[in-house]
Image (spheres, rainbow, N blue to C red):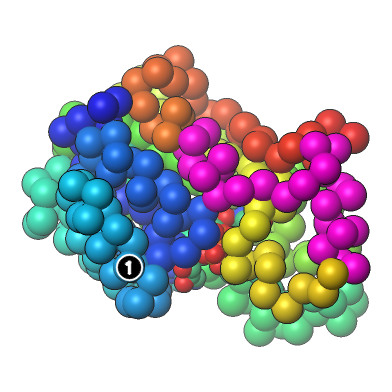
Amino acid sequence: SILKDKVALVTGAGSGIGKHVALKYAAEGAKVIVSDIVEKGGKETVDEIIAAGGQAFFVMADTGKAEDNEYLVQQAIAKYGALHIACNNAGIGGPAAPTGEYAIDAWEKVISINLSGVFYGMRYQIPAILKSGGGNIVNMASILGKVGFANSVAYVASKHGVIGLTETAAIEYASKGIRINAVGPGFIKTPLVEKSMDEASRNALVALHPIGRLGESAEVAELVLWLSSDKASFVTGSYYNVDGGYLAR
Ligand code: NAD
């Protein structure tokens, strides 16, 4: 168990990638704070962890609100007495439209959840991790944190920003016992990608991945788990893509 005795928090853990990160953390011995804005999915993740013999509890929090991030960290300390690991995973796609027509309120919503949410998360997680004797943070970026993608200006900008937040905080806390890294999945088979997608657009997406298929949430969680463990003890301020070759083209 590579995360034995660790306390880990995962946002957006009621579905997709975040759910699989929470399951893997728990399977490796961590006590997991499962957080989501949707209670049903979050509670299902907790139930699965407990059924498998792990420890977890659910906290409802909207990562786009600073005070919810503060509350989430407080709950982790109240329940398990420490915080060592945080995976800032919650994110939304936003509507598809070219930049010259992108709805202002949609831009603000995507930026508040995907970008400000990661800052708010780290803002409260870092002091708690320092008090707990050190640990690490993994922020969920995307391949679209490195390259552009038509009709997704808010998402692309937010994910580029997540990499900048990650690098800056990593420099600040590298000598203080906190490693901070970002992960960039290619297109993964989750509700975020699969909902409202027809066969043709799905095939077009697959064609962007040299490996010839979309990814699985568990394949992303495997990388997050490694970064969150002491096996990655010299890794900080880095961005790792897990993308079936998308960025190599
Ligand atoms: P998903 O929609 O399956 O799961 C996201 C979860 O986050 C949901 O349970 C949702 O309720 C929750 N959530 C949404 N807004 C929230 C908020 N304000 N506060 C708290 N929780 C909130 O999506 P996913 O595909 O698993 O995406 C997870 C992360 O991975 C996102 O940051 C996404 O941008 C990133 N990502 C996904 C893909 C992909 O292809 N699926 C690719 C690259 C990056």
Residue 101 position, x and y percent, is: 87, 81
The quadrant where residue 238 appears: top right
State the image coordinates of residue 128 (x, y, percent, origin top left): 22, 45
Q: Quadrant of the N terminus?
A: top left
Above or below, 200 relative to 236 = below
Q: What is the three-letter code of the residue carrying label 1?
A: Glu
Q: Nearer the viewer, residue 75 or 211?
A: 211
> Tag count in the figure?
1
Work out whether residue 81 or residue 17 is closer to the camera in this orientation and state it. Answer: 17
Q: Is residue 84 left or right of residue 237?
A: left
Quadrant of the frame with the C terminus: top right
Residue sticking out furthest to the front: 51
Residue at x-position 20% and y-position 30%: 4
In the rendered image, which residue does mark 1 sit on? 44
Residue 215 forms part of the magenta stretch: yes
Say whether residue 91 is visible. Answer: no
Q: Position of residue 30 (x, y in %)?
A: 24, 39
Which residue does the image show at 89% across and 49% down from the upper left?
207
Q: Could you say whether the residue bearing mark 1 is in a helix, strand or loop?
A: helix
The rendered magenta stretch, by its main secondary structure, is classed as helix
Q: Which region of the structure is painted magenta?
A: 200-224
Please tell me whether residue 223 belongs to the stretch shown in magenta.
Answer: yes
Image vertical order of residue 88 relative to residue 198, above or below? above
Position of 122 with respect to 107 (left or right) is left
Residue drawn at x 62%, y 76% as measured from the top left = 108
Ligand 1 sits in which quadrant?
Answer: bottom right
Residues 178 and 209: in front is 209
Instruction: Tell me if I can see residue 96 in this picture.
Output: yes
